[in-house]
Amino acid sequence: MEIARNITKRSARLPSLDGLRALSIGLVLFAHSHPTEELQKLAFYCGNLGVRIFFVISGFIITWLLLQEEKSTGGVSLKNFYIRRIARIFPAYYTYLAAVLLLDRAGLIDGGNTSQKLLNILFLANYGPCEGPTGVLWSLGVEEQFYLFWPGIFMIFKLFKKKKVALTILLGVILFSPALRGINTLFWKNQETYFWLHRFSFLFQMDIIAWGCLGAIVAFHWSQAVQYLAKYGVIVLLFALSIITLPYTAREYDGYGIETVFAPTLEAIGTLLIIIVGVAKSDYSVFRILNLRPVTWLGTISYSLYLWHSIFTVDLLPQCGIPQSLWIPASIGSAMISYYLIELPFVQYRKNLRWNSSKRTS
């Protein structure tokens, strides 16, 4: 199976996914570019879509690597998983927080109040105001909250072997979140439920990551399903694009819950289909573009770019005598420094933990 061959080599990265990361960060940058009033609705849609693509990719990769580890070593080390996760996220994350704090102390930016700063440190930014230079950290909060329990559930219920149990659990999550979004939209729009069910909350967003997890399990265990999707790749891609764009094209009917209830589900399904076809058929013309070196490079630094661009969308540059029009080059330059000096040194360490894990930890 092509999808398996594409990711069985230890040094290999999943084809097309860095390109999709580049697309995601491009959508987020556009959303935060202070567009004109005519483009604000499009920007809002693009920002949401960009983050949701990141979520699905994350769930797919994390779950695939858990399945690969169990297959290669006979078990999954939760200890090593969390060490890898810390090495992946924490260095760049806390470096950025430190930079925001220093600039805040210098009076160049508003880093938020004490409560917001504490929530940021604890990866609970999605329960804070979600604004200013640390506003984007809400999505990292959702991810870390999801991965607090997903690997444990994966191990406890032996989801690497019990395929139907795995699908049942994930389908439960996938149905639960839209149901909550719908109930909240219809009946619970009040202060008592807003904290738990606002659009940045874990319960509102968790099913998007779960779609990625489900896709990895299906791709790993049911090669026939992947081969079928790849066989009709063009049709699958057209269908995926149609449901991804539906929330924007149907925006005039938002009163029916298109954005608040159904958009996360539609965009997650569409993204997952693109991921599967993109990995299995990376030789398609559209995916060749996503696998061009400049595009994959941008995807490689996308995490640091996601962090650092926010600091330049406020008034930092003008206060330093630099035109605001240079915020994208400044963001990319800062992301490069963050990636090569902070992220990259931990890459080999994480690889060693990934493939040398041989103990099961419960």
Image: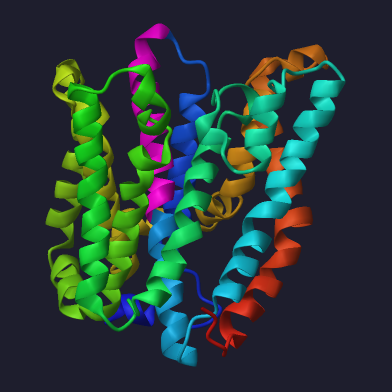
Left or right, 62 with respect to 92, comes to left
Q: What secondary structure is the stretch in magenta mostly built from?
A: helix
Q: Residue at x 44, y 10 (%)?
A: 36
Task: Examine the rendering and report whether any part of residue 201 can be seen.
Answer: yes
Work out which quarter of the rendered image holds the N terminus and state it: bottom left
Task: Examine the rendering and report whether any part of residue 245 can be seen.
Answer: no
Seen from the viewer's position, the closer of residues 191 and 111 is 191
Left or right, 137 with respect to 209, comes to right
On the image, the x and y values in percent for residue 80 come to 61, 75
State the extent of the magenta-drawn residues as a range.
Answer: 37-56
Q: Residue at x 57, y 28 (%)?
A: 135
Q: Is residue 172 magenta?
A: no
On the image, the x and y values in percent for residue 191 come to 38, 18
For residue 354, what is the image quadrant? bottom right
Left or right, 175 with respect to 114, comes to left
Seen from the viewer's position, the closer of residues 138 and 338 is 138
On the image, the x and y values in percent for residue 277 come to 26, 63
Q: Residue at x 18, y 33 (%)?
A: 246
